[in-house]
Image (cartoon, rainbow, N blue to C red):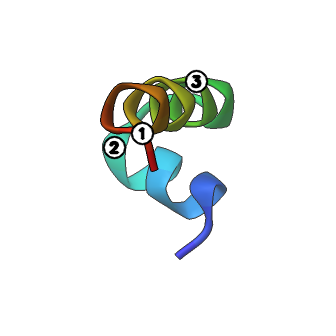
Amino acid sequence: MTQDELAVKMGVSPQAVSKWENEVSQTKGY
């Protein structure tokens, strides 16, 4: 699943998904 597909399913913008993923990866240190 791409970020765009995930964004559509969640009803948010692809930019929001990208931002959220960046924040999660920084928090968890992945």
Q: Nearer the viewer, residue 28 or 3?
A: 28
Mark 3 element type = helix
- Depth check, mark 2 against mark 3: the one in front is 3
Q: Amino acid at mark 1?
A: Gly
Q: Which residue is mark 3?
A: 19
Residue 6: x %, y % from top left: 46, 56
Q: Residues within 10 Å of mark 1 (few under 14, many from 20)?
A: few
Q: Is residue 10 above or below residue 6?
A: above
In terms of sequence position, does the residue under pointer 2 or pointer 3 come before the other? 2
CA–CA distance in space, label 1 to label 2: 24 Å
In terms of image quadrants, where is residue 10?
A: top left
Residue 11 at what x, y percent from top left?
39, 36
The image's mark for residue 29 is 1
Q: Position of residue 25 (x, y in %)?
A: 46, 39
Do tag 1 and tag 2 residues touch (Cβ < 8 Å)? no
Q: CA distance from mark 3 to mark 1?
A: 15 Å
Q: Give the total of numbered labels.
A: 3
Give 19 or 11, whichever is nearer the viewer: 19
Residue 10 is marked as: 2
- The amino acid type found where label 2 is placed reads Met
Q: Tell me which numbered mark, 1 or 2, is placed earlier along the sequence.
A: 2
In the image, what residue occupies the spot 56% across and 31% down?
Answer: 22
Instruction: Identify the residue at image location x=58%, y=23%.
Output: 19
Q: Which secondary structure, mark 1?
A: loop
